[in-house]
Image (tube, rainbow, N blue to C red):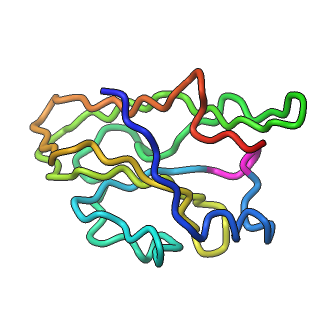
Amino acid sequence: MAVAMTKINKFVLNLGNGVFNLGSHQLKIALTNTIPTVSTANQYSDIASPIAATNLSGATPFNVTTTIFTQTSGTVKLILAALTLTATGAVGPFQYIVLYDDTATNKEIIGFYDYGSAVTMAASDQFIVNFDASAGVLTIN
């Protein structure tokens, strides 16, 4: 399923204020079943009922790997590697994948993905967060 990211309004202000270093900061995702408020959400603490990583594989299952953050002819593109989450027990429900900067002081939010309906995982189920490897998560001209 191709899903576009919805940008949080304050992301642009935070970017201009130097909150993010998208080339070196650790980006993470949060899973929630409550849609973030685009106009007021700003940081991780604004995410309603994030799901704990307790029943997901790996020591840091919510870490996202930046594969490319580069500039070409005045256009910057952020490309993230796909992230596979494997359940070791019941997980969910969640419908929204929130991308945030874990290194930033207040863990500011970049945006979120809406999967259209709630997802519930049972033990050994996998959920792949496929960030757009061609267009990137975001492009700034």
Residue at x 31%, y 48% (from the top left corner): 114
Question: Which quadrant would the N terminus be assigned to in this image?
Answer: top left
Residue at x 26%, y 70% (from the top left corner): 49
Residue at x 63%, y 50% (from the top left corner): 26
Residue 25 in magenta stretch: yes
Q: Nearer the viewer, residue 63 or 73?
A: 73
Q: Nearer the viewer, residue 27 or 132?
A: 132
Q: Position of residue 6 (x, y in %)?
A: 46, 52
Up-down: is 67 above or below 112? above
On screen, residue 74 versus residue 110, left or right, reads right
Up-down: is 58 above or below 93? above
Residue at x 86%, y 28% (from the top left corner): 72
Q: Main secondary structure of the magenta part?
A: loop
Q: Position of residue 90 (x, y in %)?
A: 11, 46
Question: Which quadrant would the C terminus be assigned to in this image?
Answer: top right
Taking the view exactly as shown, the residue that stands out farthest to the front is 141
On screen, residue 136 versus residue 54, left or right, reads right
Taking the view exactly as shown, the residue that stands out farthest to the right is 73
- Residue 66 location, quadrant: top right
- Residue 136 location, quadrant: top right
Q: Position of residue 102 (x, y in %)?
A: 58, 60
Residue 33 in magenta stretch: no
Q: Position of residue 104 (x, y in %)?
A: 67, 66
Q: Nearer the viewer, residue 15 or 55?
A: 15
The magenta region covers 22-26
On screen, residue 141 versus residue 96, left or right, reads right
Up-down: is 63 above or below 49? above
Up-down: is 139 above or below 37? above
